[in-house]
Amino acid sequence: MLTRSALLYLARQERLKDFATRFSAFKKITARFIAGESIDQAVAAISELNKRGCSASFDHLNESVSSTTETEAEIREYLDILRQIDESGINSNVSIKLTQFGLEIDPELTYRNARTVVEDAARRGNFVRIDMEGSAVTQVTLDIFKRMRAEFELNDVGIVLQSYLYRTEADARELLKIPARIRLCKGAYDEPSDVAYPDKKDVDDNYVRVMKLLLGSGVYHGIATHDPKMIEATTDFAQKEGVGKDAFEFQMLYGIRRDLQEQLARDGYNMRVYVPYGKHWYPYFMRRLAERPANVWFVMKNLWK
Ligand SMILES: Cc1cc2nc3c(=O)[nH]c(=O)nc-3n(C[C@H](O)[C@H](O)[C@H](O)COP(=O)(O)OP(=O)(O)OC[C@H]3O[C@@H](n4cnc5c(N)ncnc54)[C@H](O)[C@@H]3O)c2cc1C
């Protein structure tokens, strides 16, 4: 059976990526986790989610971009998304990855590129979430975010923290002083034990610790998880501490635990679904398989059909 680490290793293999993205049978299978290849398809998926009581966050799939021309195309794509959100009236913000805007080329270029998107979102009263990627870019991502926060308001731009990293509780305390809107997740990358807890139990304990810090801060944060134990810890803590249902939101990924998404929305919680779309689905898709290796059987079964 393929392990989490093996799947995350495969996620980084460029040749496999080229092969898989050309292999049309994969398209059908990825539809479970990816809303399509075009903005129109993502808008349609988000309209459906809105009807089911969930808001959304657009993610144009791309990462580790290595040419400035490609980063410019990413800016255009996001400006287009923000325009289409306004025109279609859907309830959605946007999520970006800094390596999509050139972090592996030049941090200054990245700042300028991401800033263009945040400025447009702020002008439209929308919000940009900066996703968190591998630990090699954690510090530079936080630095760029803090610089952005010095220029833009709390409700214009937010960041993500990952409970598998040892540094996260300290980062959360620092960011809350600014303050900042934080999405808390467990973390999706393959990290060594000198930066991240190797044991799931420690990742979960840290998740609950940081969740309590966030919910106690009075700032609107995102609790991103499909884990019923993390969700229960959050709803219990909120009830005990008198934190209102409208003071935070739950977040889940498109196509994962749809039943739970709808249940939480029906129970009166704010529920936001992260909606990825685009042609560069391979690393995102592989990370979803790594989170639940049983998903590999789902892929095999459907490839066979
Ligand atoms: C909205 C959102 C945004 C995110 N943004 C980031 C980010 O910026 N950076 C980052 O590193 N990570 C991000 N992640 C991914 C996150 O770090 C985890 O890898 C992922 O959410 C799985 O962790 P979990 O909390 O669901 O708990 P887990 O303990 O992994 O899973 C709990 C249960 O959820 C279900 N489940 C979880 N994943 C899957 C799956 N792929 N397929 C089917 N069932 C599944 C299973 O029932 C599983 O038992 C994000 C996740 C969400 C929900």
Image (tube, rainbow, N blue to C red):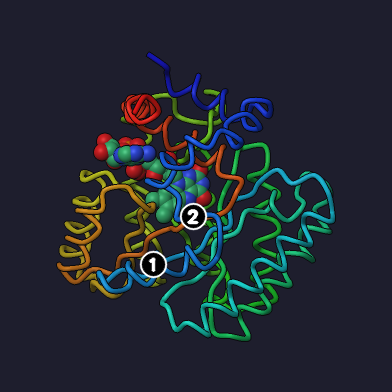
Instruction: Kindly state the secondary structure of the residue where label 2 is placed.
Output: loop
- Is residue 119 found left or right of 299 in the rendered image? right
Image quadrant in which the N terminus is located: top left
- Which residue carries the number 2 mark? 36
Residue at the extreme top of the image, as rendered: 1
Nearer the viewer's eye, disc 1 or disc 2?
Answer: 2
Residue, x 38% and y 52% (percent of image)? 253
Q: Earlier in the sequence, mark 1 or mark 2?
A: 2
Vertical arrangement, residue 294 with respect to residue 160, above or below:
above
Vertical arrangement, residue 181 with respect to residue 69, above or below:
below
Residue, x 47% and y 61% (percent of image)? 182
Please state which amino acid type lies under the numbered disc 1: Ser
Instruction: Kindly state the secondary structure of the residue where label 1 is placed.
Output: loop
Residue, x 43% and y 58% (percent of image)? 274
- Is residue 198 found left or right of 205 in the rendered image? right
Residue 231: assigned label: none
Ligand 1 resides in the quarter of the picture at top left
Q: Percent from the top left, x then y, of residue 25?
A: 47, 35
User: Is 135 or 305 nearer to us in this picture?
Assistant: 305
Residue 217: assigned label: 1
